[in-house]
Amino acid sequence: MHRYIVKRLLLAIPTLVGAAALVFVLMRLIPGDVCVVRLGAGGTHVDPASVAACHRQLGLDNPWIVQFLDFLWSYCTFDFGISMWSGNPVVQEIGTRLPVSLQIAVMATVIAVLLAIPLGTISALKEGTWLDHVVRVVSIAGIATPSFWLGIMSLILVLNVTSLATGTPWLPPIDYVPPWKDFWRNLSIVALPAITVGYRYSAVTMRITRSAMLEVLREDYIRTARAKGLIEKIIINRHALKNALLPVVTLIGIEFAFLIGGLVITEQVFNLNGIGRLLVQAVQNQDNVLAQALVMLVVAIFIFTNLVVDVLYAWLDPRIRFS
């Protein structure tokens, strides 16, 4: 197991270098100039000498290969640089936004797992019954409903119900407060977006759970276990569900990593300053340093999540050996 983990970590190095090269080239192919955007933000005339001085300050006058090598070396030394737009350290910019996206992703994952696995399992066990049809309708509705529309509708519903109950309009807090400082205020900020994202997340996972369970329940070893007289609960929990969870765990891991940087629309609807919104702003402002750091963060989270998922395979299915 230890050799496998070390090997996977070493294989992650070429993945990170390839992602770094790709985002480095793509950011410089986007039309525009961060110096022109920053100096002309107020609608004033941009002096070419000022633009050239800005290029020298940011190192944009160097050849691409030099900029790329500097970029790689800075990440090897854990120096993520200074934002080209705000002038703040990139670590500070990410540190203020990452807790929001991370908390929503964790809460949405918990909601999805608590809904999808039990309902998907029940739907497979009760195939063809009214309960199966209800679960399938709920899952299809979650897949077909856009997250931003569901978020807007849930926000409007909560606003209307609260206004009618209290007689005063209620708006969710704009500033993010960590849960250890003010739990209820934090919950009022992240509850609605987490439920909105978690419902769609659970709908996809529910479908995969149902399909995997139906496939496993038709296997010969399940029929053999029933023929031996094992209790149905033991057959489902120890034999069927653990084997059916392999594709489900893969999906959960991929979706969780995607949620870290893929909540752009949800963050926009609920006015949250998360990683996804920060990445869009960095691309719009031609802030190459910040955009590169955000993309590399998402890539690193994907790599780590896939490693955790692969390790969980051995626990779910003892037949899997890492060698």
Image (cartoon, grey):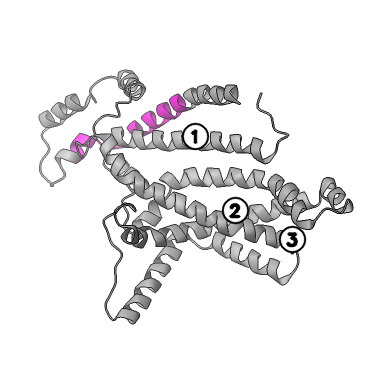
Q: Secondary structure at mark 2?
A: helix
Q: Quadrant of the C terminus?
A: top right
Image position of 27 with respect to 98: above or below: above
* Spot occupied by residue 284 in the image (x, y as percentages of width and height): 29, 44
Res 155 → quadrant: bottom left
Q: Residues within 10 Å of mark 1 (few under 14, many from 20)?
A: some
Q: Which circle's residue, 1 or 3, is located before the other in the chain?
A: 3
Q: Which circle's residue, 2 or 3, is located before the other in the chain?
A: 3
Q: Quadrant of the N terminus?
A: top right
Which residues lie in the magenta part?
16-37
* Circle 2 or circle 3, nearest the eye: 3
Residue sitting at x 35%, y 50%: 100
Q: Which residue is mark 2?
A: 205
Res 74 → quadrant: top left
Q: Which residue is mark 1?
A: 304
Q: Amino acid at mark 1?
A: Phe
Q: CA distance from mark 1 to mark 3?
A: 34 Å
> Mark 2 near mark 1, Cβ–Cβ under 8 Å?
no
Residue sitting at x 34%, y 80%: 165
Q: Which residue is mark 3?
A: 125
Asked whether residue 30 is drawn in magenta, I would say: yes
Q: Secondary structure at mark 1?
A: helix
Q: Is residue 42 left or right of residue 68?
A: left
Q: CA distance from mark 2 to mark 1?
A: 21 Å
* Spot occupied by residue 263 in the image (x, y as percentages of width and height): 41, 51
Q: Residues within 10 Å of mark 3 (few under 14, many from 20)?
A: some
Q: CA distance from mark 2 to mark 3?
A: 16 Å
* Spot occupied by residue 90 in the image (x, y as percentages of width and height): 27, 35
